[in-house]
Amino acid sequence: MTQTEDEVAGLLLAAGGGRRLGGRPKALLTHRGRPLVEYAVEVLRAAGCARVHVVLGAAADAVRERARLEGCVLVTNPEWEGGMGSSLRAGLDSLAGTGARAALVCLVDQPGIGARAAARVLAAYRDDSSLASAAYDGVRGHPVLFGAAHWAGVAATATGDRGARAYLKAHEKAIALVECGDVAEPYDIDTAEDLTHLE
């Protein structure tokens, strides 16, 4: 295990209930023959994250039952209906005391972002004050890397569905943007039309 693998934890936000998908939990949508949450965990591992924490919410019991998530730390967010912010807080909280010095945050509903993009952002890690984000043609997107020095600030401002947006905006000048538009597509699986992206 390299130093980076030991210090940067993968944090997968997979709690969404898929409101605009008729209430189909996003974690259990099928992609490449398996649940989307399984695929996303493999992306983080292939990128170099030895430790992966997965935040579950909608249909958490069914996800635990159907998805193969061995070796992951599963975190249940009872407030998942309040939006992504609560899942981000729950995930960062679960990393406290683990020895992780940074979190590479991915969203379960972005299967177009694979291991190559995640590995590029991971490579921007320097220490616990690191702050980096994937960019697509210069526009900030996911994944995002938060050094541990930022966790309290992110948690304090993560509300509703905005996640870390307010924190990132306030610290824009400190963010290392990592261009990933040549290796990934940052679409979300939000509506029935978006399901065409799944294989």
Image (cartoon, rainbow, N blue to C red):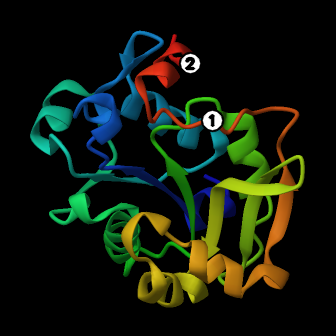
Is residue 82 placed above or below 67 in the rendered structure?
A: below
Q: Residue 100 has which mark?
A: none
Label whose residue precedes the other's in the sequence (1 or 2): 1
Say whether residue 18 is visible: no
Q: Residue furthest left?
A: 61
**Residue at the image position 81 percent from the left and 32 percent from the top:** 183
What amino acid is at disc 1?
Answer: Tyr
Judging depth in this view, the residue of 27 and 128 nearest the camera is 27
Q: Position of residue 76 (x, y in %)?
A: 20, 58
Crowding at dot 2, Cα within 10 Å, few <14 / some 14-19 / many 20+, comes out as few
Say whether residue 60 is visible: yes
Q: Which type of secondary structure does the marked residue at label 1 adopt?
A: loop
**Residue at the image position 65 percent from the left and 65 percent from the top:** 145
Q: Position of residue 16 (x, y in %)?
A: 31, 47
**Residue at the image position 49 percent from the left and 67 percent from the top:** 162
Q: Do the residues bearing badges 1 and 2 touch, measured as CB atoms within 8 Å?
A: yes
- 50 left or right of 115? left
Q: Position of residue 90 (x, y in %)?
A: 31, 70
Q: Position of residue 5 (x, y in %)?
A: 61, 56
Q: Residue 197 has which mark?
A: 2
- 176 left or right of 20? right
Crowding at dot 1, Cα within 10 Å, few <14 / some 14-19 / many 20+, comes out as some
What amino acid is at disc 2?
Answer: His
Residue highlighted by disc 1: 187
